[in-house]
Image (tube, helix red, strand yellow):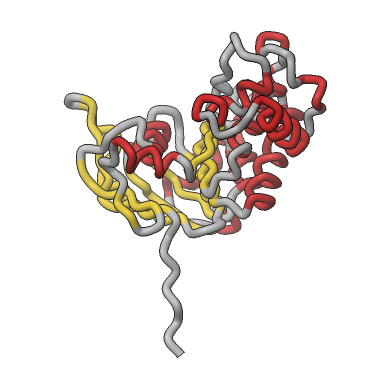
Amino acid sequence: MTKKTITPKIRIRGLSKSFGSKHVLRDVNLDVMPGESVVIIGASGTGKSVLLKCIIGLLEPDAGTIEIDGMNIAHAKGKERDILLQKFGMLFQSGALFDSLPVWKNICFKELQEGTLSKSQAKTLAEQSLQAVGLARDVMDVFPDALSGGMKKRVGLARAIASRPEILFFDEPTTGLDPIMCGVIDNLIKQCVKTLGATGVTITHDLTSARFIADKIAMIKNGSIVWEGPVKSLDTVKNKDVQEFVHGHLAFQKAGRVKT
């Protein structure tokens, strides 16, 4: 029997992006399979965020292709881009909540703007989404400035999953959180991806989170993917760049500067 070929949920080939004379991404190639959780690791300034912004359409690449379900969307605009965005959910590093809106309106902002839900329907969806991230309905009418950092992250995650997206993106999800809350967010990310049956893409420099969240890890350095493989191979891989990153992370852990 011929083995059935599975189309990657996300397929990136030859992706490059520069800002003037600064080359940020250089010929990036990466496959993310349906239902897979891929974590892209690397030090600050290596191109992780720019890669993520290219995938979700905030930046247009200079060269290369980005395929979602086999369709090249690297230069998608207008209605084509709008259709694409319906597949995405995003947890931003800062939470990116609207300070002037209560929690429930933040969670259902897109649906309210598009007029696809009534007020009562939006509140029901917000309550369900909050429940999924471990928050009670009594925060629905609270404004973001009254929330702790961990609660803001969870509200941001509730917004990301509200529309039941096919692909979830996480931008440095544990940055700025204490070790206990980091663990809470890691668990919620893993749980939400599994419950939705979604494909997950996370960028982080936090190896503790990466080990917990990932099925596969890809390491980016100087704008290129220098290694990718299953998370269980991270400690045995012979790649020098990966070894230096892992050992450097362990050194920070021993110094008490990275969550354990």
Residue 80, position in %: x, y? 33, 43
Q: Is residue 190 above or below residue 4?
A: above
Q: Which of 197 and 40 lies nearest the eye of the viewer?
A: 197
Question: Which residue is drawn at the image coordinates 66% and 33% (left, top)?
Answer: 158
Whether residue 185 sits left or right of residue 108 in the image: it is: right
Question: Which residue is drawn at the image coordinates 62% and 39% (left, top)?
Answer: 161
Q: Which residue extends farthest bottom?
A: 1
Q: Is residue 121 above or below residue 242?
A: above
Residue 45, position in %: x, y? 39, 28
Whether residue 21 sits left or right of residue 229 in the image: it is: left
Question: Which residue is drawn at the image coordinates 67% and 15% (left, top)?
Answer: 102
Q: Which of 251 and 130 lies nearest the eye of the viewer?
A: 130
Query: Quadrant of residue 91 in the image?
Result: top right
Q: In what quadrant of the picture does the C terminus appear?
A: top right
Residue 107, position in %: x, y? 63, 27
Say whether residue 109 is visible: yes
